[in-house]
Image (spheres, grey):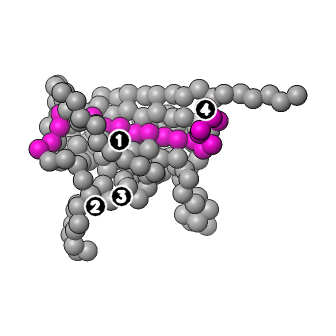
């Protein structure tokens, strides 16, 4: 007899201030919600990506009405559908939009900033930007498919 159990997808949405302290609030909430749900390395990567996306929203974009940024994440546990064989976390940061499309920039080795989306791209499986009439959402999907054993310190 084979018993299979589908694990439900879960999602969260948090409104944070369009201010640097908003990144700390978002990191704390994400960590609290996913601490016991995903591999620690996947959680660390998701927290780093979320912090970069919030930081970019605060530095480069206008806030949503009310002076806020909307932060959301979704967990699709391994086995929650036929195509998911690893835990997948999607993080999404929605703001009022920026004058320039978010993109990875070529920067000098000694530049003090400008690496945010390069970090996002390196840690995530894929990322992108969605725009609608209200603003823009920058999202990233992480599956933990990176080599955890190689990346963890002893």
Residue 17 at x, y = what percent? 23, 33
Other residues around mark 1 within 10 Å, as few (<14) / some (14–19) / many (≥20)? many
Q: Looking at the image, is mark 3 or mark 1 earlier in the sequence?
A: 3
Where in the figure is residue 28, as x and y percent of width and height? Answer: 41, 39
At a point 23% along the width and 43% down the height, the residue shown is: 57
* Above or below 107: residue 148: above
Name the main secondary structure of what is drawn in magenta: loop
**Is any atom of residue 36 visible in this view?**
no
Indicate which disc, 4 or 1, sits on the residue closer to the N terminus: 4
Mark 1 vs mark 2: in front:
1
Q: Which residues are magenta?
A: 79-99
Quadrant location of residue 104?
bottom left
Q: Earlier in the sequence, mark 4 or mark 3?
A: 4
Q: Which residue is mark 3?
A: 119
Determine whether the residue tagged by mark 1 lies in a helix, strand or loop. strand
* Label 4 – label 1 distance at C-alpha: 21 Å
Eye-nearest disc, 4 or 3: 4
Quadrant of the rendering where the N terminus is positioned: top right
**CA distance for labels 2 and 4:** 34 Å
The answer to if 95 sits in the magenta stretch is: yes
Q: Which mark is residue 115?
A: 2
Residue located 43% across and 51% down the image: 124
Q: Kindly report the distance in space between the C-alpha atoms of the residues bearing marks 3 and 2.
A: 6 Å
Q: Badge 4 is on which residue?
A: 81
Q: Which residue is mark 1?
A: 139
Q: CA distance from mark 1 to mark 2?
A: 16 Å
Q: Are marks 1 and 2 in contact (CB under 8 Å)?
A: no
Q: Nearer the viewer, residue 69 or 106?
A: 106
> How many C-alpha atoms fall within 10 Å of the one at disc 2: few (<14), some, or many (≥20)?
some
Residues at badges 3 and 2 in contact (C-beta under 8 Å)? Answer: yes
């Amino acid at each position: 007899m084979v018993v299979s159990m589908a694990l439900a997808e879960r999602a969260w949405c948090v409104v944070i201030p369009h201010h640097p302290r908003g990144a700390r609030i978002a990191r704390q909430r994400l960590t609290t919600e996913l601490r016991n749900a995903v591999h620690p390395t996947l959680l660390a990567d998701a927290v780093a990506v979320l912090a970069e996306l919030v930081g970019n929203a605060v530095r480069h974009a206008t806030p949503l009405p009310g002076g806020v940024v909307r932060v959301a994440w979704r967990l699709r546990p391994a086995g929650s559908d036929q195509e998911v064989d690893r835990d997948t976390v999607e993080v999404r940061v929605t703001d009022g939009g920026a004058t320039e499309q978010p993109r990875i920039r070529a920067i000098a080795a000694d530049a003090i900033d400008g690496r945010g989306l390069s970090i996002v791209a390196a840690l995530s499986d894929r990322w992108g930007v969605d725009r609608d009439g209200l603003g823009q959402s920058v999202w990233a999907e992480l599956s933990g498919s990176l080599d955890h054993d190689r990346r963890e310190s002893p």
